[in-house]
Image (cartoon, rainbow, N blue to C red):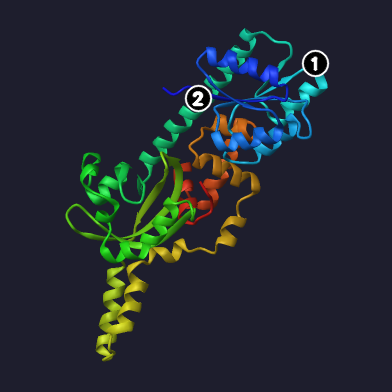
Amino acid sequence: MDARKILIIEDDVLLSKTLKNVLSAYGYEALMANSGAEGIQKAYEFSPDLILCDINMSPIDGYQVFNILEDSSVTNKIPFIYITGKSDLEDIRLGMELGADDYIVKPFSNEELLKSIKVRLAKYEKLVNIGKSDYQALVELSPNGIFIFDGETIYEINNAFSETTGYKPEDLKRITFKDIVDEKSYVSIQSKVLKCAKGLMKSFDEQINIITIDKCHIPSKLYVTASQKFRGFTLLIGLLETVEVNQSEYDRLVSILSEEKVDISGKLASKLQRAFEFPALKSAAVDRTITTSIFSKREQEVLKLSCRGLPIKIIADELCISDRTVEKHRASLMEKTGSKNIVEVIIYALKNDLIEL
């Protein structure tokens, strides 16, 4: 396991070096920043596992450093501990009210410092693991095929993906993303997939045809969103929603047109195919302004955190509300979307592009 990275933001160079030596002796990788501005820059550059930050710095103090990092989704989850020489309770209370995880008052012992770091890292790791396990549970419960890929190689698939395509996890070594979509579909989405993989586009959705292991073509709606960077490339999350073809209505209309001797080749045939081959997209293309307006601001916050796989308790802590209030907001989301559970709400939100993961 790689050493945990700890960023020390401290304008007292001597103290900063002392802290670095102590942390290095206990197996941590310590990074130093001698000003608030440098600390902010290094937080973005190195994504540390924890930040130790002095309060009394100039021109950017520790409070400003925290507020700036808190505004970014890249840095706002990093455990943050204040180091301060101020023993005044009001100053300490202000730091904690901003949302810092802990504070240490100078002078402090190495044992006190190491204990605080250990506790905060352990708590953060526990939250991350809870989120991962809950997110995985949501993925497996989804009725839609979900897969993780980099534009070419497919790394993970859920049960619904296997049921739709016939491919099992052990088959992933011999197929690529190009193998599961027909040639016409691949050409139409290739550039968008590449842009997502390069971080130039956050997400997109497109009508495609999926090719199963038995070489059957299944009309589907594909949703792709950028997930996380890993070893120099961006992993993507794909969601497949199969579309039921309304064949009976299509056949009836073709029959009527034939009786009236209407030529249904060429452009007319293409228009009819588009109109009837993907009827489910009409209901999915709900006016987004109307749809989002039915959610309150707090409901949107609860929905976004739920999409990250966080349990009710963690969502309540994140939003500083009670568990019961989170449950009420979830119930309201289910009622407004006609969903039976929160998984269906999340799928509804993804399908209608109501949230960004």
- Local SS, label 2: helix
* Residue 320 in sight from this viewpoint: no
* Numbered badge on residue 338: none
The residue located at (53%, 54%) in the rendering is 354
Residue in front for this viewpoint, 273 or 37: 37
Q: Between disc 2 and disc 1, whose residue precedes? A: 1
- Residue under pointer 1: 87
CA distance separating discs 2 and 1: 30 Å
- Mark 1, residues whose alpha carbon is within 10 Å: few (<14), some, or many (≥20)? few
Q: Where is 130 relative to 17, above or below?
A: below
Name the residue rendered at 35%, 78% in the picture: 271
Name the quarter where the N terminus is drawn.
Answer: top left
Q: Nearer the viewer, mark 2 or mark 1?
A: 1
Q: Secondary structure at mark 1?
A: loop
Please state which amino acid type lies under the numbered disc 1: Ser
What residue is rendered at 64% in x and 44% in y? 298
Q: Tell which of 94 and 40 is nearer to you.
A: 40
Taking the image as shown, residue 223 lies to the left or right of residue 100, namely left
Residue 59 quadrant: top right
Q: What residue is pinned by disc 2?
A: 125
The picture places residue 48, in percent across and down from the top left corner, at 55, 29
Residue 131 visible to an observer of this rendering? yes
Task: Find residue 9 and report its horizontal and vertical position in percent.
Answer: 67, 27
